[in-house]
Amino acid sequence: MEFTVSERMKSLKGSAIREMFKAMADPTMISLAGGNPAAELFPSEELSQIAADILKENPVGALQYGISEGNIALREKILEMMKEREKINASLDEITIVSGGQQAIEIVSKILLNEGDSVIVEAPSFVGGLNAFRSYGANLVGVEVESDGINIEKLKKTIENTPNVKLIYTIPNFQNPSGVTMSVEKRKALYEIARDNDIFIIEDNPYGELTFDGVKLPTIKSMDEAGVVLYSGSFSKILAPGLRLGYLIAPKNFTEKVVLGKQVSDVHTALLPQLLALEFMKRYDIGELIEKMRALYKKKCDVLIGAMKEYLPENITYTVPGGGLFVWCNAPGIDTLKLSNECIKEKVLIVPGNNFATDQSLVNNGFRLNFSTMPDDKLVEGVKRLGKVLEKYC
Ligand SMILES: Cc1ncc(COP(=O)(O)O)c(C=O)c1O
């Protein structure tokens, strides 16, 4: 049957990254494109034992309907973790379990955005966040990310010149896609600007724990006395993304709306993953698992950067991240959408920068590389292939 797509869906395009998964069916293809965590670190045996125990000992707790706010013991455990690891002090009525950080962004959009309202986003930014805002008819306004985070002067000007700014969306740690971490000074400035202008901040922090050297900068939420920061956390990059488990920490009056929004989206997050994460954290030290991830990703990032130094033309500049999963490259004068298509012919996948832009139709010189999933030799070979394609352009 023919059908007309709603206005709010018209601005959404299929994710190029998901499209690239199709190209991965070719076994000779090397992907520097995805953003998946390293599957070898999934604690599958531990989770398998825990799942069996839960379904035997507490089947109703896992299989019956639950409350929309999320499992109380899990929320308490996360709050404990937040206090200890992120210096965030929040109470039980300020946290909601969500089905991944993606859902946190979607529910916040549902609560705050009317058609045509503006959302200030980092340029470039996470495509899932951008699409959530787009799906609620938001006007996206990008403010450039510098090597120490969003450009604060431009942010101020943008707020002055843009009507109905409802939200500022930031990924302060090892940003997807740029790999950049926002300085403490900029975190403070961003918080004060949002507070003084009555604008909510979504602080999206799925990568903060993946710091290579263990250094963690204060979360913006930890500075929040005015209740303007909506903090989105996720188990996707510190446990397993297939669990679809995240949490949103927000002021109590906002959380009441989150719970209503959540009921419309999916009633509640599936209970088995909630219990799996809770029990995993009771039986094991999740900090130890995080340490393993930090070490693995640091090693892989070093391999990628080493290969980039050796095989990429000199005019290609890139960020050297202190954590996370991504390196952002700048190829002056090159349309990276065309470049990525050339790369597919050479059997290497990269993500062209237009995917992360507010206007995806504009020519973009940036592209994103990922280092978390490929074995070391393939990381090197992938960069060699990319270098070969770039040589043709440069
Ligand atoms: C910046 C950022 N936010 C949120 C998400 C969504 O994560 P999830 O829904 O798996 O928690 C991702 C996933 O890649 C991301 O990169």
Image (cartoon, grey):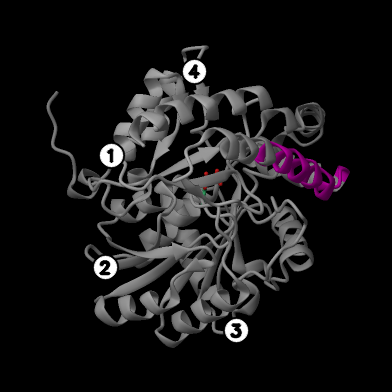
- Of labels 2 and 3, earlier in sequence is 2
Numbered label tally: 4
Between marks 3 and 1, how big is the CA–CA gap? Answer: 38 Å
Question: Which mark lies nearer to you, 1 or 4?
Answer: 4
Measured Cα–Cα span from mark 2 to mark 3? 25 Å
Between marks 1 and 2, how big is the CA–CA gap?
A: 20 Å
Structural distance between the alpha carbons of marks 1 and 4? 24 Å
Q: Which of marks 3 and 1 is nearer the N terminus?
A: 1
Mark whose residue sits in front, 2 or 4: 4
Residue 29 is tagged as 4
Residue linked to disc 3: 225
Q: Name the residue under label 2.
A: 117
Q: Is the magenta stretch mostly helix, strand or loop?
A: helix
Secondary structure found at label 3? loop
Residue type, label 2: Asp
Amino acid beneath label 3: Glu
- Mark 2 or mark 1, which is nearer the start of the sequence? 1
The answer to which of 193 and 66 lies nearer the viewer is 193
